[in-house]
Amino acid sequence: MTDDQQQLVPHADTGQYRIRIADLRDIPALLEIEQAVFTSQWTYAEFHRVLDTPGVIALVVQDRAVSIPPHKYASPQGRNLIVAMGIGARVSNFTGGLWNLGVRPAYQRCGLGRWVLGSLESRLLGSAPKLHVDAVVVETNVHAHKFFRACGYRALRVVHQQFDDHDADCYYFRRTLYRQPPAPL
């Protein structure tokens, strides 16, 4: 990790980053991340539909050290650059799904992806004692495979032609989360 990257690691004492719930006004920034990170991107309409769906958890990370022009985004949460995003939902009492996770290339390998993933997992688990969290990753996205494995996910199987917009096979990853029992008094 370079010195520049070490400065980007989110620490509560620096206050450089903040994570918050995404809203519809964040879609232009989410599209920028999609275009920078993925070969197959969600559209504005897909982001709008997902963010407007009850039960969906969408998080963004803002870099408080980078301001953007006031006209660029109309986010009421401030005018700081959105550098990472994560979207997921609880699909049953025992299963949650990660639908989208991305970090701007200049901010990758700094802990922000793990931070968003951990925050999503925590929110998906809620008060359940146990939850399986699933993610589908395109076969050619080797960096994402390494990331999910490093975060405790296991590749369970290959799914053939999961997505309509490309022919690549995908890996189906899963991690099982457990609620920690309260500490004894």
Image (spheres, rainbow, N blue to C red):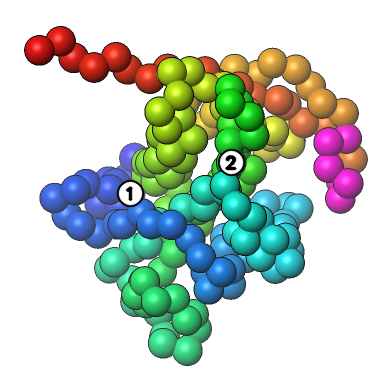
Question: From what the image shows, is residue 131 above or below residue 28?
Answer: above
Residue 105, percent across and down? Answer: 51, 54
Quote the CA–CA distance across marks 1 and 2: 30 Å
Q: Main secondary structure of the magenta part?
A: loop
Question: From what the image shows, is residue 185 above or below residue 108?
Answer: above
Horizontal side, residue 29 vs residue 17: left or right: right
**Residue at label 2?**
89
Q: Nearer the viewer, residue 185 or 8?
A: 185
Q: Residues within 10 Å of mark 2 (few under 14, many from 20)?
A: many
The quarter of the displayed image where residue 80 is located: bottom left
Q: Secondary structure beneath disc 1? A: helix
Disc sitting over residue 5 in the figure: 1
The answer to whether one can see residue 183 in this image is: yes
Identify the image quadrant of the C terminus.
Answer: top left
The answer to whether one can see residue 121 in this image is: no
Residue 123, percent across and down? Answer: 43, 38
Residue 133, percent across and down? Answer: 57, 27
Q: Residue at x 57, y 63 (%)?
A: 30
Q: Nearer the viewer, residue 20 or 13?
A: 20
Q: Residue at x 39, y 46 (%)?
A: 112
The residue segment tinted magenta is 161-166
Q: Nearer the viewer, residue 152 or 3?
A: 152
Residue 18, percent across and down? Answer: 31, 57
Q: Secondary structure beneath disc 2? A: strand
> Quick one: label 1 or label 2, which is nearer the N terminus?
1
